[in-house]
């Protein structure tokens, strides 16, 4: 399985709507890890540098049905040809109690990856096929290593 099989024409068309507004959409997290491991992803994880308000405006202007799935954490589900896609705005965990986080939105793709748990989950893939891997998750995946992003104690507390 490869990324092209996940990128439906409708999803690629929606990306163009985001790009027309100066934003982008990328594959992220578990689906990137699974693709690199040669495993069929269970779902398509997507992120965007558009904040939730900007996402909603794009969907409304294009007549795309959407659901405010997890709006408090920046996740909105866009429904394209009957297929739901959860798209989460890039974010920072400003404060967390270990279960819930107070978030702030960012335009920084790397900062969003930095808040993730393991290096193998802290990768993104552009729809043009470029792997973004600032914490060497691909190498860790290849080596069979599960390593925390940053300080392990901090990640465990989160």
Image (spheres, rainbow, N blue to C red):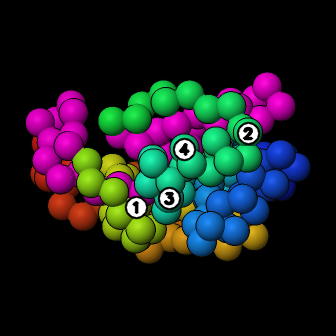
- Residue that badge 3 annotates: 50
Q: In the rendered view of the protein, which quadrant contains the C terminus?
A: top left
Q: Nearer the viewer, mark 2 or mark 3?
A: 2
**Residue 84 in magenta stretch:** yes
Which one is earlier in the sequence, the residue at label 4 or at label 2? 4
Q: Are marks 4 and 2 in contact (CB under 8 Å)?
A: no
Contact (Cβ within 8 Å) of mark 1 with mark 3: no
Which residues, given as a range, are shown in magenta? 73-102
User: In the image, which disc is placed on residue 63?
Assistant: 2
Q: CA distance from mark 2 to mark 3?
A: 17 Å
Dot in front, 2 or 1:
2
Q: Is residue 10 left or right of residue 51?
A: right
Q: What residue lies at 41% left-to-right and 68% top-to-bottom?
A: 107
Mark number, residue 56: 4
Q: Is residue 34 visible?
A: no
Secondary structure at badge 1 equals: helix
Residue 2 percent location from the top left of the image = 80, 53
Residue 148 location (% of width, % of height): 30, 56
Q: Name the mark on residue 113.
A: 1
Q: Secondary structure at mark 4?
A: helix
């Amino acid at each position: 399985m490869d990324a092209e099989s996940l990128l439906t024409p409708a999803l690629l068309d929606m990306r163009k709507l985001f790009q027309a507004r100066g934003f982008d959409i990328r594959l992220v997290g578990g689906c990137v890890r699974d693709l690199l491991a040669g495993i069929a992803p269970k779902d398509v994880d997507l992120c965007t540098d558009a904040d939730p308000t900007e996402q909603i405006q794009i969907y409304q202007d294009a007549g795309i049905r959407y659901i405010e799935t997890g709006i408090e954490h920046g996740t909105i589900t866009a429904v394209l040809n009957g297929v739901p896609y959860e798209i989460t705005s890039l974010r920072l965990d400003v404060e967390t109690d270990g279960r819930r986080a107070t978030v702030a939105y960012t335009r920084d793709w790397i900062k969003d990856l930095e808040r993730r748990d393991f290096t193998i989950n802290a990768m993104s893939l552009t729809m043009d096929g470029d792997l973004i891997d600032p914490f060497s998750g691909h190498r860790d995946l290849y080596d069979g290593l599960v390593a925390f992003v940053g300080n392990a104690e901090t990640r465990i507390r989160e």
